[in-house]
Amino acid sequence: MHEKPLDLARSRILISNDDGINATGLEVLERIARNLSDDVWVVAPTSEQSGASHSLTLHTPLRVRKIEERRYAIAGTPTDCVLFAVREIMGDHPPDLVLSGVNRGGNLGDDVTYSGTVAAAMEGALLGIRSIAFSQLIDGPHKAKWETAEAHAPAIIRRAVEPSWPAEMLLNVNFPDVAADAVTGIDVVPQGRRKIGVEFEERRDPRGIPYFWFGRQRDEPDMDYETDLSAVRAGAVAVTPLHLDLTYQNQLERFQSAFD
């Protein structure tokens, strides 16, 4: 448990993502972080790692490239990046805050179990560091409204680090696909249900051999309560506290009895 508020102006901030070191969303998050602190470090994957979830690179070496002072690219996953940054690159002075993103596209509902963006924040939480994942929703064939994330993220960060911060908790923040001045508010809501589509798109290579892509379809059941999904649909920023303990607490007693 972090009992005291975090003094952002004196904090060391680590930034990572899953879209890669050259992603526009990472540039956005850098600007956000540098407006909060002068001590900002960037350690991100060399290439896009969307869907990497909380995976580690175990069967190939991690190639680490120092681009400039306090900026590194790693040929690995978002989890690799945060773990290596905290234990090796910043080992003598670990970060006070981990920020991940800004992801190009939402990480809502069940997306969080697949998301490399959320996984980077998850690794930070496992290492005992306050951690926040940011995603910018894109609901249609147009450019991401990065200005929405850039306008609203600083206040969210400042407010988030004021109260005590429970151990093994991270925040998942999704910005709606609306202009910055059209945001309706900030809603703290539970995770909804949205699973990636089960349809596959079949294609054939020049030799006639079939291959497949995941379809873009999403399964979004109607909810009769407020969630991260309903919040962004209403034009609000969705803030969801996530916990690393996946135990289904209210079923423990039932299954303990079943196995007695």
Image: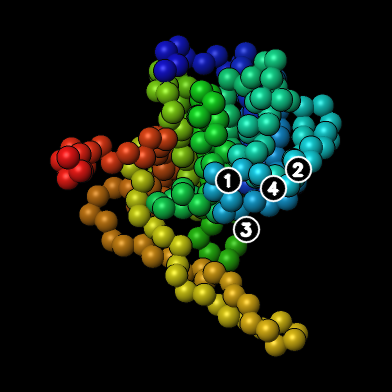
Front disc: 1 or 4: 4
Disc 2 is placed on an element classified as: loop
x and y percentages locating residue 60 in the rendered image: 73, 47
Disc 1 is placed on an element classified as: loop
- Give the mark nearest the N terminus, 4 or 3: 4
x and y percentages locating residue 158 in the rendered image: 50, 24
Label 2 CA crowd tier, 10 Å (few <14, some 14–19, many 20+): few
Type of residue at label 3? Lys
Above or below 2: residue 33? below
Residue assigned mark 1:
55
**Residue 259 can be seen, yes or no:** yes
Type of residue at label 2? Pro
Disc 3 is placed on an element classified as: loop
The answer to the question of whether label 4 and label 2 lie on touching residues, with beta carbons closer than 8 A, is no
Q: Nearer the viewer, residue 138 or 78?
A: 78
Front disc: 4 or 3: 4
Residue 59 circle label: 4
